[in-house]
Every structure is written in structure tokens, then in C-alpha cells.
Image (spheres, grey):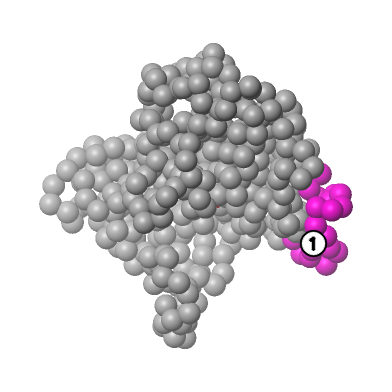
Amino acid sequence: MDKKLIDESKKYLMNTYNRVPILLRKGRGMHVWSADGKEYLDFVGGIAVNCLGHCHPKVVIALQKQAQRLLHVSNLYHIEQQINLARLLIENSCADKAFFCNSGAEAIEGAIKLARKYARDHSPEDRYEIISAHGSFHGRTYAALSATGQEKIQKGFEPLVPGFIHVPFNDSEAVRKAVTERSCAVLLEPIQGEGGIRVPSEDYFMKVREICDEHKLLLILDEIQTGMGRTGKLFAYEHFSIEPDIITLAKGLGGGVAIGALLAKDAVASSFQHGTHASTFGGNPLACAGAVATIETLLEDGFILDSCRRSGKYFFSKLEKLKKDFPSSIIDVRGLGLMLGLELTMAGGPVVEACAKRGLLINCTSGNVLRFTPPLIIVEKEIDRLIDVLEDIFERQPQ
Ligand SMILES: Cc1ncc(COP(=O)(O)O)c(C=O)c1O
């Protein structure tokens, strides 16, 4: 049954993903079950999407209720759930206005358009250049791909959208040197995710913010992976004592339902007017009902964010201990909250496979960085189980 469906997956779907040969059928909290009944502990969480765990009852009930009432009407009309979601995001962030779309890449496209439109509305010069970072990842659509600082992802799709300048991450002087009379914005992830879980130094964003203010550039933070509590705060910018002008969100925002968002300060958001930007499905009642239930649950009593910070610290310390015990297998431990990476001296693929065989789903990014983005509800004994298995795997490696 499993095997037949997996064969059909290869027959009928484009070959864009290198999938683990597992077909998942059911999920609950930290656990998922494959079609053949095997249980897994999930440290991937749909790549930083399932922040409340799989099928959180509050999200499921909100979706069920909404599905019975109204699925789609379009943005020709006011949508109650969209207004509720915007209010929640605005009341809990430094932004003033929201625009909803359906994915991360679409949020990035919107941010790029908004930054360029703002520059054209406010500057007599032609300012359109956007400075982003080497190793960044912003999505697979054309402008997002062009903003992404990884040649391997861009290769074969040229010509790219012009006007993107890439500089080393965590180097504010490189940002300063890249500013020209054509610059309009700086686009950065607070912590690089796909680029290998790279956390910048504490003062990096303060310095970048200063450069932006000095040269009248917008600071766009791509919080698609870091947002919605992943780092122990609702938004990762809160760790760096700065406020961005534009924030992009997706992944965890819907707790498993496809939704993206663009948040901006009033002065910036006002460059989008009737007809300048739109999305048929963006902010539909179903996705917004799921997102409202997700954020309300995430913020309830601060319990989940507290727990994320605590589990994140515990997880980090266990990974540090692993690094100490297996110095010839592990190069580095990085991350914040429950967005953690373990850089290996070898390819991560075989470790991912070995973990899957032992009932643990983990992921590898950048070839040799094991990435852990579990649901924020993870508990210590689940972390211990992964550490025991990793220990066993590294013990078998020559040290
Ligand atoms: C930081 C960041 N930006 C943008 C994206 C693109 O999001 P999506 O896959 O929803 O288009 C991702 C996806 O991994 C991401 O991590």
C-alpha cells in the first residue's frame, strides 16, 4: 500500500523534492504516524510550521467551524477573520498594517514591491536596489529567488530580477559599503535558516538599523522561519533591540494552514493603495481562522513561549555536550529557542536516515547542518530521546 503510493508519487509528481520514503498519515502533538503504522517523534515540525504540534485541537476546531460557515469570498468584501488576525498581529508587533497572502515567497514578493514603491513615492532619484545577504534564503519565485544569496538555488534560472546586491551576513560594514544612491532597502533573516542556522552577533541589527536610518533605507526582516515564537519570542527582532519597517511571515503563522503575511509601519504601508497589490486567496476566512486560533493559543498566558525558551536552552546544552563528546563528528552548535543547528564534519543525510529508522524525524540543511525545528510544545524527555539516538549514531563513527 505504502510502496504503491510512493511509486505513484514518483510517477505523477514533478521530481522537485528529495523525499524520505515515508508516507505520513496522522499527527498529534509531537507525534506522527506513517501509513504502515510506525510512530515518529517529529523534530522537523513541517519545517518550522507546526508550532503548536500536529492537529492542535483549538486549531482543528476553529477550522472545522469556519469550514461549515464560509470558505472564500475574495477581497472584494470585508472578512471578519482577516480583520481579527490583523488586529492580533498588529497589537503584538511593532507594525501598524497587515497584508495577507498564501506563502513565504509571496510575502517576500510583496515586501520587495512595497519597498520599491515606497522609494519611488518618497524619493526623486530612481532607488530600487535591495541589499541582502550571502547564504540567505527568501523563496523560489523570481524576485525572492533573486534576493536569495545562494548561487546553487539560482543556477539555471537566469536572467534573475535585477537590483539585488549580496553582502556577507553578520557584517554591518559590508552593508554600509554596498549602499549606493540607488539603494532602497536591506532585506535580512534575523537568523539564517536554510543557510545553516546562523545567528548574528548581538549588535549586528542595531548597526544595520543605524545604516538604514542614515541612508533612508527600509529594513525588511524575513521572519518567515524565525517568527511565531520559534526563537522564544513572538518575533525574532525582539531579541535585537530594533524595529524593522517591514516584516514577512508565513510557516508557523497558520499552525499548519497555508498563509503568509506582510506587516509594515503605517508610513510605509501607505505606498500600497487600491490596485497596487492583491491576492485572490490571500487572507481567506479559512486560513485566517486557523491563524487566529494558532496565535491566540501561542500567546495564552505566555506558557508556550516560556516553554520554548526553556526547552530551547535545555536542547542547546544537550547538543553542546554532544559536541564535547564527539569532537571529530561535530563542528558547531547554533541557534536560538527551538531553531537549532548541529554542524557536522560529514554529510547529514545518513544521520537523517539513521534517525528515521529509529523513529525520529530530523532534517539537514546546507549539506552538513542537522536542523531541529520541533513543535514549541516539546518536552525534555523527547529531547533526551533524540540525544540518546544521536549519541549512539556518533559512537559508531570513528572519533
Ligand atoms: C526565511 C525564509 N524565507 C522565505 C521562505 C519561503 O517560504 P515558502 O516556502 O512558504 O515560499 C522560507 C522557506 O523556507 C524561509 O525559510
Q: Which residue corresponds to the image point at 52% horizontal and 52% vertical from the top-left?
A: 141
As drawn, which residue projects farthest toward the left? 398
Q: Which residue is mark 1?
A: 72
Image-based side of 20 in relation to 12, left or right: left
Give 309 or 353, whichever is nearer the viewer.
353
Q: Is residue 335 visible?
A: no
Q: Which residue corresponds to the image point at 40% horizontal and 41% vertical from the top-left?
A: 149
Instruction: Decide: is 16 above or below 129.
Output: below
Task: Decide if ligand 1 comes within 8 Å of the CB at mark 1.
Answer: no
Residue type, numbered disc 1: His
Instruction: Decide: is 268 above or below 356.
Output: above
Q: Which residue corresponds to the image point at 43% horizontal and 81% vertical from the top-left?
A: 11
Q: Which residue corresponds to the image point at 58% horizontal and 39% vertical from the top-left?
A: 112
- Please identify the quarter of the rendering in which residue 243 is found: top right
Category of crowding for the residue at label 1, using alpha-carbon neighbours closer than 10 angstroms: few (below 14), some (14–19), many (at least 20): some
> Is label 1 in a helix, a strand or a loop?
loop
Task: Tell me where residue 337 appears, x and y as whole percent.
Answer: 49, 37
Task: Tell me where residue 244 appears, x and y as whole percent.
Answer: 59, 27
- Please identify the quarter of the rendering in which residue 132 is found: top left
* Residue 76 counted in the magenta span: yes
Instruction: Report the magenta residues as a range.
Output: 62-83
Task: Tell me where residue 55 appears, x and y as whole percent.
Answer: 63, 60
